[in-house]
Image (tube, grey):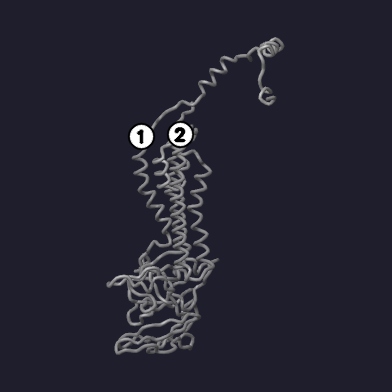
Amino acid sequence: MNHISPRHPLMAAGMSLILPGFGQLYNGMVNRGLLVFMAFTLVTLPLVLWVTFSLPASMMLPLLTITVIVNAGIWIYGIVDAWKIAKINEDYILRDWQIPAVYLLIFLSAIFYFVPSMSQYMRTNLIESFSVPSLAMTPSVLQGDIVFANKNYNCVGCAQAAKRGDIAIFINPNNRTQYHIKRIVGLPGDRIRMEGHELIVNSVSLSKSEVNKTSETTIVSEKAGNAEYQVQYTGKYNRSFEEITVPNGEVFVIGDNRNNSKDSRHFGTVPLQDLVGKASQVWMSRSEEGFRWDRFGLVVK
Amino acid sequence: MNKQNRGTITDSELDELLHINASVSPPEHFTQQVMKSINALPQTILNRPTWLQWLALTLGGIPAIIQTLAFIFSAWHVAAIG
């Protein structure tokens, strides 16, 4: 027997709040509910893909901010729409499928499978944020920076291969539960040695000029591949090393803070397969004194 | 005036029509069919959501909102570097 069961606006809105499109299902509008859910989930993915594959790193922060705003907009639209429709649905006749088991099945599969899967896909394959707790990459990446990392990196079909000068995030060779962030200076087959403040790759010095020198610190400009960046030596630097050849399938990584970094000089070369991403843009930076607003949106290089 | 009279019918014309058209007999099982249709009419239940439904919404809503926010901010989810 059919039942007239007026829709409760607060229940409809609440259901749309916990899962976009769910309130529309409660109102019996299957297509509309599906549309809201798909818009909510699929609006993010193309934008993030666009950012990852095609756009320069400087566009990462603004476009990812836009995806959050669009997502929130669709979410709010779903809530208001469910509320409005429920309010005018006084003569609503319950559909046969509107039983608790169906709602539960839809809810569980969306919240514990579809939504987490998409979040995981984005973090694993497209973009993830990393907070930097160490001084090892000063002055390029400071302690307290949070950076977006492009995860579409160094894999078959990826937009970018590992190259000299990249600030890479990789799995710590001595502790695979941790990530490290360092600069790649040597690719497989490269010959690398360090003499004083000079890093020499394949008999060519990466060091270009001294940018700044104080009694404590020397800032040196280096160029590796297309990347130009600054590195820092403090006090009396004595970590020169003899020439080594980077084995096949591995890379040589080194921190920009040459005195204060545990890197390939310490744990050896890093397998290419352990590179998980490339640092692209700072989206938050905080020191003990407070926020470093000038670093927000800074493209790291 | 003519327009107004077009739809009206006089008593004599009605009598004439009733004599021409004999009464139509109802279809077979007419009464049963009518009663069946009446039984199939929706029954009004003015049910408001029960406390159990509100509880389910609240309890399910907590992990759901966390997952939804995690999705929106998936790129902003911060992993620590050792």
Q: CA distance from mark 1 to mark 2?
A: 18 Å
Residue A169 has which mark?
none
| SS type, badge 2 | loop
The quarter of the rendered structure image containing the N terminus of chain B is top right
Look at 41% across and 52% down and name the residue there: B68
Q: Residue at x 56, y 15 (%)?
A: B32
What is the number of callouts on the image?
2
User: Residue farthest to the right?
Assistant: B20
Which one is closest to the eye, mark 1 or mark 2? 2
Residue of label 2: A90
Q: Which residue is mark 1?
A: B50
Q: Amino acid at mark 1?
A: Thr
Task: Using the rendered view, name the quadrant where residue A132 is placed.
Answer: bottom left
Q: Nearer the viewer, residue B36 or A243?
A: B36
The chain identifier of the residue carrying mark 2 reads A
Label 1 residue SS: loop
In the rendered image, the vertical position of residue B55 relative to residue A47, given as above or below:
above
Between A48 and A222, the one lying in front of the other is A48
**Percent of width and height locating residue A219:** 37, 86
